Structures are given as C-alpha cells and as structure tokens.
Amino acid sequence: MDGPETTFASFFQGGFECSSHRRRDGVRLDLLRATGHDRHVAGDYRQLHELGLRTIRDGVRWHLIEKTPGRYDWSSWTPALEAAADIGMEVIWDLFHYGSPDHVDQGAADFPQRFTDFALAAVEHQQQVVGGRPRLCLVNEISFMAWAVEVGYFPRPPGAERKGWFKEQLARTAISAAAAIRSAYPDALLVWAEPLVHIAPRDHRRKSVEAAERERRGQFEAYDWLTGRARPELGGDPSFADLIGLNYYPHNQWYLDGPTIPMGHHEYRSLGTMLVEVAERYGKPLFLSETGAEGCGRAAWLHYVCAEARAAMSQGVALHGICWFPITAYPGWDNSRHAEAGLLSTVTADGKRHVDTRLLAELREQQERFRAWSKQPSERVLEPA
C-alpha cells in the first residue's frame, strides 16, 4: 500500500489526457493520439505500474468508435483493455471526455439516450474482452463543459446560450447513463470528476459578496443533481456516485469576474477546508480525480496538495486517492504548446518516456509520509504545507 485504505489499487494515480472535442474553429482534438498514448499504451501502463501507480484514468474515443449511428468499432479501445489486463493496471474509463461523433447533436432531445446506448455498449464490450468490475467516469466535468459551451469556448449547440440549459442537458445525460449502468451492472464503480473551486468577491459590498457566493455554490449543482439532493425530477440518486471526484489545479481560485487568487493571499482558501466542506455535504468518500501543475512547479504542487489532503483526512475526510493529471506531457488545446505537466515526458526518439526526477522524488516522499500517517493514527496532526 502507498497510503491509506482505498477503494483503488493504489492511492496515488495517474491520468491520461483524453480530450477529443472539436475546438470552436472546428478542429477535432485527439489527445490520446497527440501524446502517443494510443500507440504506446502497453509501455505507458507498464512504466506507471513499475513506478507504483497502479490505478489510472484513461479514456475511450467515442468519435472513433461510433462513426455511423448505432454501429460500433472497438478497435481503438481494445488494445488498451487488453494491455491493462495483461499488466494488472486498474483503469477508470472516461466514456465522454467532451468529444462525441459529428452525427451526434449534444443539444438534441435524444442526446441522453444516444450516450446511454453507447455507454451500455462500451461496458458490454469491456466485459466480453476482459471482464471484471467496470470502473467508469461516465461524463467528465459537467460544470466545466457547460461553462465552455455557454461562453463559446467549445462549439455551441442551439439553446446552449441560455445560462444553465446545457448543464441540465449534461446532467440528464449523466443520470440516464448512470441509471442504465447501475441496472445492468450493479457492481460497477461510478465516479465523476468535477472542478473544485473557490470564488471571492473583488470588494466587500453586499451585492459583490452575495454574487461571488452564488457563483461559488454553483460548483455543487452537478453533484446535487446527480445524487438527487436537488432537482429530484431529473432522476438523480445517491447510488449514482460511489465516490465524489474533484479536480483541483493552481488556477481553481479566482475573484468574481477577475484574476486568479495567488496562493498565500488572504483570500486564498486552503484545499483541506474545501475537501472538508464537500465531504460534509455529500457524506461520501472523495478522491482528487485530477490535480497537477506545470514545469518546475510540479513537485511543490504535489507537496502542497498532499499536506492539505492529510489535513482534511485528520478531520475525518475519507479521501481515497490523488490522481496526477495529465501524467504525460501534452500539447495545449488551443495552440499545441508543449506542456511539461506530467511525471512522464513525451515519447522520445528511443521510444521511451523519460521520468521527471524531481516530481518522482516528491512522489516517493509523499508515499512514505502517507504510509507513516496511516500507521500512527494517534499522531495525526495538521501539518504546515
């Protein structure tokens, strides 16, 4: 074990960037291809497994699988399923990481059923090829995707210009698929990945404070709807979320309609207190489904996140994992800039990925700290970051 008791094969995890949406200029992204992961999947899994990361997030590319309506070609996914089974890698599969086939209208009334049909077919294929418990993130980042569509960062289907409309569409889609999967595969592990944010007012006038708090609390809508805590007419249920996944990055705190709040500023909220708030709200185990930083800030960011995770766990939060995302370097969505954000580099001329030694050293240090923390519950105290 590399840390506390967990639902997963390893407490520390890695995620592969698998976005496959179209940009607003019409260009289709395929980050599994752009990072070389689709061609080096077995080597990538083996390398991470040897480094002790035995649970990962990875994705399927719906646009490659369902090129014509209702007909599925699994050739882009099967090698990854088989490689994971051969190596012993536990995978949480993202089924809808923003991208869908061009013949699918994400704003249409039939979109929830179209995705549900695909999700059921995907799990059936996984069961036929390798079997085992399905581990799924059905719809990635409902909140972020809804925002991206509303502001026009992603292509906007008709109707999505109305604030809140597309988030509800995605929630209905997620709930439809979750209900179908839970019925057909009761033992499936259903997790989600939603942004964890803090929003502060730029001044302390009453209207500013209230507006910032409304925006901040909006981050809970997706989970509230999925679990039936709010909008019960959508069909949400607590059983649709086995774990609450939270995505947290250095830019996840900002002033309302303003810039990012820098760490150390009096308006910056500690990650530990944010985790406690979510745990108390839903009464379910959590995991950091995504976290990470770029360049020379990677090791320091992992140090901070882990210290805050232990602070939250010392207050009773059941945190089941920390997933570094993405685990490899990748090209930026908008301009293909080279982003050194992972533990592993791009694939080099020798066909291998190099390991970032500073981040690996910090990972080893944090694995040891969590081991020690887990063995000495009487000495679990809050620690400085």
Image (cartoon, rainbow, N blue to C red):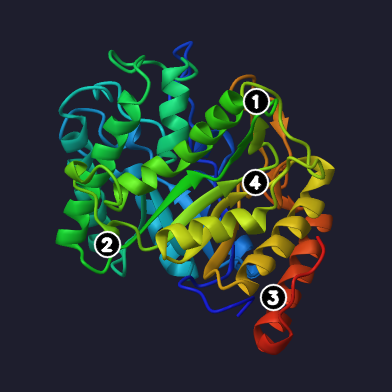
- Which of the marked residues, 2 or 3, is nearer the chain's N terminus? 2
- What secondary structure is marked by label 4? loop
Q: Is residue 143 left or right of residue 253?
A: left
Foreground mark, 2 or 3, reads 2
Type of the residue with mark 4: Thr
Q: Earlier in the sequence, mark 1 or mark 4?
A: 1
Circle 4 Cα neighbour tier, 10 Å, few/some/many (<14 / 14–19 / ≥20): many
Report the mark closest to the observer, 2 or 4. Answer: 2
Instruction: Examine the rendered structure and indicate whether residue 58 appears above or below residue 32.
Output: below
Q: Which amino acid, mark 1?
A: Arg
For the question of whether residue 95 can be seen, the reply is no
Q: CA gap, disc 1 to disc 2? A: 41 Å
Q: Which residue is mark 4?
A: 328
Q: Nearer the viewer, residue 276 or 202?
A: 202
Where is residue 136? Give x, y as percent: 36, 55
Say if mark 2 contacts mark 3, CB within 8 Å: no
Residue matched to label 3: 370
Q: Is residue 199 left or right of residue 25?
A: right
What is the crowding at mark 3: few (fewer than 14 residues within 10 Å), some, or many (at least 20)?
Answer: many
Q: Residue at x 27, y 31 (%)?
A: 169
**Residue corresponding to mark 1:** 205
Q: Which mark is residue 286?
A: none
Identify the residue position indicated by label 2 in the image.
Answer: 239
The quarter of the displayed image where residue 168 is located: top left
What's under tag 2, amino acid-wise?
Answer: Ser
